[in-house]
Amino acid sequence: MCKNGKLIILSGPSGSGKSTVVQRLLQESNLPLTLSVSATTRPPRTGERDGTDYHFLSDEEFNKRRLAGEFLECKEVFGRGYWYGTLRSAVSTGLNEGKWVILEIDVQGALSVLTDHPHAITIFIHPGSVTELENRLRSRGTESEDAIQRRLDVAAEELALRHHYTHEVINQEIHTTVQQLCNLLAQYQGENIPCSKN
Ligand code: 5GP
C-alpha cells in the first residue's frame, strides 16, 4: 500500500547534467519529491557527502547487503569494479509516505526496476549530442582520459536504449530543463498510478 506515492526513474549519460537538474527540481517543484539515495562502492568525489549524495559502502558491506536482498536493483556500472544499487528501504519508505520518489540510475538499473514497477514515470535526459557530452565530461575535469572514453562508450549504449523511456528531455539550459520537468510531472498529478505490479 503506498498512498499516492509515485516512482520516477531518471536516467541519462554521465555528463548529461542530470544530478544538477535533479537538485534544482527538488528545490523548485511544489510536488512532494524526494531523491532515493543510492549505495555505491566508488569513493566519494570532492564535496560529496555520505548519506546525501550516496551511501558510500565498502565492497564487503555492499556485498553483504546485496546477499541480504536489500537492493531493488544493483549492478557494476562502467565495468571498473564499482557497484551501485537502489535500496529497497529508500523506495518503500518514500512511497509509503506518499512521496514521489526519484531514482537517478543507469539504463540497465531502470529496466530492472521497471519489471517490478511497470507504471513508473520514466525520463531520459541527455545533452543532445555526443560531442556536447564529451565537452561537458572534459570540462568537469573529474575523470581520467580512460574513464572519459569508457563513459562515452557507455553513453552511446545508453542513448540507443532511450526508447524504453516515456519522456525524453534535452538538457541545454538548466532553467528551461527544470521548468520542462516540472510541467511534465504536473501532468501526473491526480493520476492514480499503481506503485508496483502487486
Ligand atoms: P556517478 O559515479 O557519476 O555518480 O554515477 C555513475 C552512474 O551510475 C550514473 O549513470 C548514475 O545514474 C548511475 N547510478 C547511480 N546510482 C545508481 C543505482 O543505484 N543503480 C544503478 N543501476 N545505477 C546508478
Image (cartoon, rainbow, N blue to C red):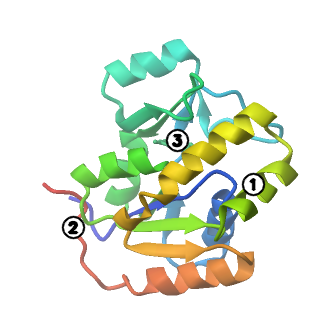
What mark, if any, has residue 194 been given in the picture? 2
Q: Distance of mark 2 from mark 1, alpha carbons?
A: 38 Å
What mark, if any, has residue 134 been given in the picture? 1
Sequence-first tag of 3 and 2? 3
SS type, badge 1: helix
In-front residue for pair 36/9: 9
Task: Tell me whether circle 1 and circle 3 mark residues in contact (CB < 8 Å).
Answer: no
In-front residue for pair 81/104: 81
The nearer-to-camera label among 2 and 1 is 1
SS type, badge 2: loop
The amino acid sitting under disc 1 is Glu
User: Is residue 49 in view from this perspective?
Assistant: no
The answer to whether residue 41 is above or below residue 181 is: above
For the point 55% across and 58% down, the residue is: 12
User: Which image quadrant shows ligand 1?
Assistant: top right
For the point 58% across and 24% down, the residue is: 57
Q: Position of residue 176 (x, y in %)?
A: 68, 84
Give left or right: position of 117 versus 141.
Answer: left
Residue hosting label 3: 38
Q: Position of residue 139 (x, y in %)?
A: 86, 53
The amino acid sitting under disc 2 is Pro
SS type, badge 3: loop
Sequence-first tag of 1 and 3? 3
Q: Position of residue 72 (x, y in %)?
A: 34, 40
User: Is residue 76 in view from this perspective?
Assistant: yes
